[in-house]
Amino acid sequence: MSTSVNGGSVVGTTKHDVGVASGVGRTALLVAAARAIETHRDDSLAQDVFAEHFVLAAPASHGWPTRLCQVPDGEANPLWGRFARYFGLRTRVLDDFLLQSAHTTDARQVVLLGAGLDTRAFRLDWPAGSVVFEIDREEVLAFKHKVLDGLSAAPRATRVAVPVDLRADWGTALAASGFDPAAPSAWLAEGLLFYLPAVAESALVAQVDRLSARGSSLAYEVKLEPDLMTYRDSPLYTATNQQIGIDLLGLFAKEPRPDSAGALASNGWATSIHTPFEFTHRHGRGPHPEENDALAGNRWVFANKP
Ligand code: SAM
């Protein structure tokens, strides 16, 4: 079934099944499991003490590891070794991006697009007056609230859940939740854009631009390989499908991706594009390039609106 952005309603939900039980929502559990494993590493890059609780609470992640010692082949496992480490590195880099935006600019609004089981509102040291808006589908956010409420977790900023589909008119929902487009903001789309149709990605980036006052910043992840199927037999995709039944390539939108960094640059944003491996080098740990690498086209894009 095809999907489209059509003035507020969403056409096509085949790949976006409800909650974290299946479809793209279940990928949020994959990232949570990876963050749990990262948290318990001796050389951890990022700490998320809530992550393992999502994995343990959801029937859809029954039996998944939350520590590397629970994985028989440990580090050598393409999914819970290298791929989980990738998510750990990504978490750290994007934690740093948001904290730098919060502490070195006037941005007190943070918007997590496709927030999933991101617990940054609870984990990070936000300046006084910060508001974290979390956008995802209602059922995903409901599962997240249930788990966090059960832990009596307390957010470290004002936290506003915005349950809406990002293929629809999410800007209106965000504004109705108290977001102020006249004030600067920091935006994050982590592990999101490759699940959206190209038209929805372009609409999302244009919307972020419209809602961003000067002094705003944005970070997002894209996959730049011209043909996603190039790495269909890679250890990373194969292990993810075989071990936990998540067919990432089946969930990704297949059409050519828009040049979102170019669109932002033409609207006056300053952009920089990095491979994850640059951050592996910077932190002294993380994934390295390999043959037939599903991470080869991954890029992390950072943008500021001066
Ligand atoms: N950003 C989170 C993180 O890194 O922990 C979650 C990443 S998870 C791989 C992808 C998330 O995108 C899921 O929570 C999913 O529900 C959300 N998502 C995908 N398509 C969406 C859509 N059309 N509208 C809202 N959320 C969507």
Image (cartoon, helix red, strand yellow):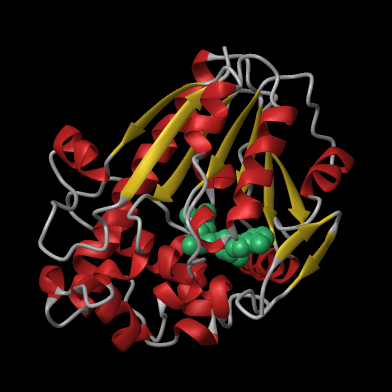
227 lies above or below 130: below
144 lies above or below 77: above
Return the x and y of residue 240 as percentages of the image width and height.
32, 78
In the image shown, does 255 or 260 lie closer to the viewer?
255
In the image shown, does 44 or 277 lie closer to the viewer?
277
Report the residue at 79% width, 66% height from top: 10
Report the residue at 56% width, 82% height from top: 22
Report the residue at 19% width, 72% height from top: 78
154 lies above or below 38: above
The quarter of the picture showing ligand 1: bottom right
The N terminus sits in image quarter: bottom right
Is residue 179 rendered to the left or right of residue 199?
Answer: right
Is residue 29 rendered to the left or right of residue 9?
Answer: left
**Identity of the residue furthest to the right in this view:** 176
Is residue 183 rendered to the left or right of residue 57?
Answer: right
Q: Is residue 58 visible?
A: yes
Q: Is residue 118 visible?
A: no
Q: Quadrant of residue 301?
A: top left
Count of residue discs: 0
The C terminus sits in image quarter: top right
Return the x and y of residue 286 as percentages of the image width and height.
19, 49
Return the x and y of residue 305 as percentages of the image width and height.
58, 18
Q: Quadrant of residue 160?
A: top right
Report the residue at 70% width, 24% height from top: 129
Return the x and y of residue 303 as percentages of the image width and height.
49, 26
